[in-house]
Image (tube, rainbow, N blue to C red):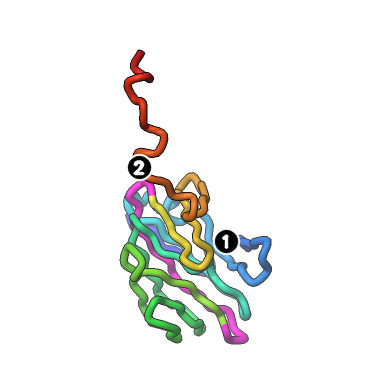
């Protein structure tokens, strides 16, 4: 059965952060409503002067933006590009897929955000040196990275 979403039947919720420049409107649970098993997707609207999520990339998810209306600037490792109605932007897994949006216009920027869902994802934020384990939303500083065997010495003592 087809499930059809549009501005007439989707409710948007404003997502704010403690940093006022990060704010967007997002649809709620569209993939769940549609019964999707492998895709996560949301309709999003970015107000003028606002940034999307902090600059990031996914280690275990691909992401695709389909621009529905408006214009915004897209930041990637290659630089800044303007996106407009009808554009499709694909972000592969890993550092080369890093991205962030900024609405530098006076009109809302609306887009469909589609992501693969493999269960657990690790999102890395190059600007702030953090990682986020999804879906649990566990955020850590990457500077706290330790050697794999740290604290594993004297293993035989633990078997006594």
Q: Position of residue 68 (x, y in %)?
A: 45, 77
Q: Position of residue 47 (x, y in %)?
A: 61, 76
Q: Is residue 105 magenta?
A: yes
Q: Nearer the viewer, residue 8 or 80?
A: 80
Q: Is residue 119 magenta?
A: yes
Residue located beneath label 1 in the image: 11
Residue 47 visible? The answer is yes
Within 10 angstroms of label 2, few (less than 14), some, or many (20 or more) residues? few
Relative side of 96 to 10, left or right: left
Q: Which residues are magenta?
A: 104-120
Residue located beneath label 2 in the image: 148
Q: Position of residue 132 (x, y in %)?
A: 48, 53
Residue 84 visible? The answer is no
Image: 128 above or below 34: below
| Residue appearing at x 61%, y 60% in the figure | 13
Image: 111 above or below 143: below
Quarter assignment of residue 75: bottom left
Question: Residue lying furthest front in this view?
Answer: 154
Q: Nearer the viewer, residue 9 or 13?
A: 13
Q: Quadrant of the C terminus?
A: top left
Quarter assignment of residue 51: bottom right
Image: 59 above or below 76: above
| Residue appearing at x 39%, y 76% in the figure | 77
Q: Quadrant of the N terminus?
A: bottom left
Secondary structure under tag 1 reads loop
Numbered circle sitting on residue 136: none
2 vs 1, front mark: 2
Relative side of 9 to 60, left or right: right
Secondary structure under tag 2 reads loop
Relative side of 29 to 121, left or right: right
């Amino acid at each position: 059965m087809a499930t059809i979403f549009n501005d007439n039947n989707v409710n948007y919720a404003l997502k704010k952060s403690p940093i006022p420049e990060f704010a967007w409107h997002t649809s709620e649970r569209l993939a769940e409503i549609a019964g999707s098993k492998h895709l996560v997707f949301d309709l999003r609207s970015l107000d003028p002067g606002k940034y999307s999520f902090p600059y990031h990339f996914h280690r275990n998810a691909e992401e695709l933006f389909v621009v529905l209306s408006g214009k915004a600037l897209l930041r990637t490792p290659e630089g800044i590009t303007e996106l407009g109605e009808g554009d499709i932007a694909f972000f592969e897994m890993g550092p080369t897929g890093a991205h962030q949006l900024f609405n530098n216009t006076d009109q809302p920027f609306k887009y469909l955000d589609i992501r693969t869902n493999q269960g657990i994802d690790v999102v890395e934020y190059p600007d702030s040196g953090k990682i986020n384990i999804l879906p649990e939303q566990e955020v850590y500083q990457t500077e706290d990275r330790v050697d794999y065997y740290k604290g594993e010495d004297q293993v035989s003592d633990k078997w006594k």
